[in-house]
Image (tube, rainbow, N blue to C red):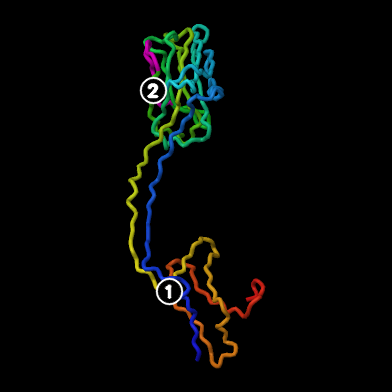
Amino acid sequence: MITTSLPLNRMLPLACCGLSLAFVHPLVAADDILIDDFTDPAAAIKTVKFWGGATQTYDHDATEDSGGDPASGALKITVGYDLAARGGDNQMSARRQLDTTPVDGTKYAKLEFDIKYDPSSVAQGANYGNMEVGIAHTDWSQYYFATVQTPVGTTGWRKISVNVNQLNPKLDQLRDFHFKIWSGGGDGMTGTQIFWIDNVKLIALPSTEPPPPPPTIRIEPSVAGLNVISSGNGQYDRQTLRTTTPQYSWVGAGAPVTYSVTVADYSKKPGMSTVFYLVPGTGLGTGDN
């Protein structure tokens, strides 16, 4: 009997060792969202009146910027209150729709913005009114995180930072940054109020994932012979080898011929198989072998 074995172990150089690396990637926290820094004059048109009987105008003001950047600007809001004429509707309300909606607010810790009042503004007692700050949902309902008061006589910009209330049942459906001032009570305001808003942001929650461990490195001895690696994940992924000269034919042999291959180590993955093809010649069409 003539036994012929395919010389697979000569078809690849033998490596002295194998290096196996395992990396663990942490979950990444969401990015902060800059809702608006009002650098673009066209951004002013994205902040609009929501409701309220007080007169309201929204303009880009290139002469104001919380960071003092002459190339930027801020949103200027002018409100005309009239308690006698408006009664319980003596109020203003504004919204700035987020550029991409809806936003999942469960990923954010704080809502921040800068505010500045014109000192000539009408006041309500010792402050410039009670500004309720929050968000509107995709169904147009509102939720307020805090009430902000700016004392009369405050000059310059103030940074306001309020906590995002994680108990809001619709927090994953954010549509708008929203704020309002109601002044319809007995001490309601009458007159003009001017203030500026800048750098409206949602600040992301920090990641709760621990830092990744260092890479695990281990040195393994190489396996003698041809190491075949399955590199794809498709249903019909396969790796194929063939001999380069037709010297393994049984035609004309004086005795039975055996074809064999030894597999030293096999994948534990289900569905793996090893197949022999005995190809009867050259120049055959696809599928004819």
Q: The residue tagged with tag 2: helix, strand or loop?
A: strand
Magenta segment: does it hold 152?
Answer: yes
Q: The residue tagged with tag 1: helix, strand or loop?
A: loop
Q: Main secondary structure of the magenta part?
A: strand
Residue 19 appears in the rendering: yes
The residue under label 1 is 225
Q: Is residue 106 above or below residue 284?
A: above
Locate the C terminus and report the quarter of the image it occupies. Answer: bottom right
Q: Which amino acid, mark 2?
A: Lys
Q: Which amino acid, mark 1?
A: Gly
Q: Position of residue 223 (x, y in %)?
A: 39, 71
Front residue (pair 256, 68) = 68
Q: CA distance from mark 1 to mark 2?
A: 68 Å
For image coordinates 50% across by 16% down, the residue present is 77
Q: Residue furthest bottom?
A: 254
Magenta segment: does it hold 91?
Answer: no
Tell me the crowding category of disc 2: few under 14, some 14 to 19, or many 20 or more residues within 10 angstroms, Cα based: some
For image coordinates 46% across by 33% down, the residue present is 33
Residues in magenta?
Answer: 144-156
Q: Is residue 212 above or below residue 256?
A: above
Residue 169 appears in the rendering: no
- Left/right placement of residue 81 relative to residue 279 reads left
Q: Position of residue 200 (x, y in %)?
A: 45, 26
Tell me the crowding category of disc 1: few under 14, some 14 to 19, or many 20 or more residues within 10 angstroms, Cα based: some
Q: Position of residue 19 (x, y in %)?
A: 37, 62
Front residue (pair 36, 57) = 36
The residue under label 2 is 159
For image coordinates 46% across by 30% down, the residue present is 34
